[in-house]
Image (spheres, rainbow, N blue to C red):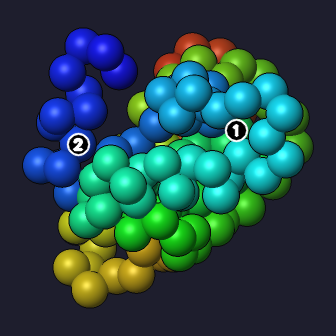
């Protein structure tokens, strides 16, 4: 954060980060009872027009903008988590694919679903990959 990210944020359309990163960047106090609202307020103040997308691991993801939480998506259930390596990158790929490649008018909620779906498929195998169609 101190490395210049704060100055870059207003120039971004989307900022994708995980729960731990959001907690650290926003300097969330341990006593915070509503961390998601804390994040929304922080990013709304620092970069009002940037979508802040926070991945929540097995709890899914959420999208914030202008100090508000606009959308939430639950994680897609999987039978068994084998390895979470690469799940965040898989989420980002699915989110951006859903947002820009499927339909330019796709909602942020649909993009979150794409992200969560691809991330969930990633955790079902060892290493950062998506399972084959077997």
- 32 vs 48: above or below: above
Q: Quadrant of the N terminus?
A: top left
Residue at position x 65%, y 16% in the image: 126
- 73 vs 126: above or below: below
Q: Is residue 46 visible?
A: yes
The answer to which quarter of the image holds residue 51 is: bottom left
Mark pair 1, 2: CA separation: 23 Å
Q: Position of residue 81 (x, y in %)?
A: 80, 30
Judge from the rendering whether residue 62 lies leftward or rightward of residue 99; answer left or right.
right
Q: Is residue 88 visible?
A: no
Kindly report which numbered mark, 1 or 2, lies closer to the viewer in this rendering.
2
Residue at position x 18%, y 50% in the image: 10
Q: Position of residue 102 (x, y in %)?
A: 29, 73
- 1 vs 8: above or below: above
Q: Which residue is mark 1?
A: 57
- 120 and 67: which one is in front? 67
Q: Can you tell which mark lies on residue 9?
A: 2
Tell me if mark 2 has few (under 14), some (14-19) or many (20+) residues whose alpha carbon lies within 10 angstroms of its own. some
The answer to which quarter of the image holds residue 7 is: top left
Numbered disc 2: secondary structure: helix
Judge from the rendering whether residue 106 lies leftward or rightward of residue 131; answer left or right.
left
Residue at position x 24%, y 13% in the image: 3
Numbered disc 1: secondary structure: helix
Q: Position of residue 115 (x, y in %)?
A: 49, 54
Q: Position of residue 116 (x, y in %)?
A: 59, 53
- 119 and 134: which one is in front? 119
- 76 and 131: which one is in front? 76
Residue at position x 26%, y 86% in the image: 105
Residue found at the very far bottom of the displayed protein: 105
């Amino acid at each position: 954060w101190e490395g210049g990210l704060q100055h870059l944020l207003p120039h971004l359309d989307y900022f994708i980060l995980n729960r731990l990163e959001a907690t650290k960047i926003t300097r969330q106090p341990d006593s915070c009872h509503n961390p998601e609202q804390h994040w929304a307020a922080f990013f709304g103040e620092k970069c009002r027009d940037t979508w802040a997308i926070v991945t929540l691991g097995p709890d899914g993801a959420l999208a914030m903008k202008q100090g508000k939480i606009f959308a939430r998506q639950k994680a897609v259930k999987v039978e068994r988590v084998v390895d979470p390596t690469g799940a965040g990158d898989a989420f980002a790929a699915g989110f951006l694919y859903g947002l820009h490649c499927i339909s330019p008018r796709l909602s942020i909620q649909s993009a979150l679903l794409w992200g969560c779906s691809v991330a969930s498929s990633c955790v079902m195998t060892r290493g950062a990959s998506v399972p084959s169609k077997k």
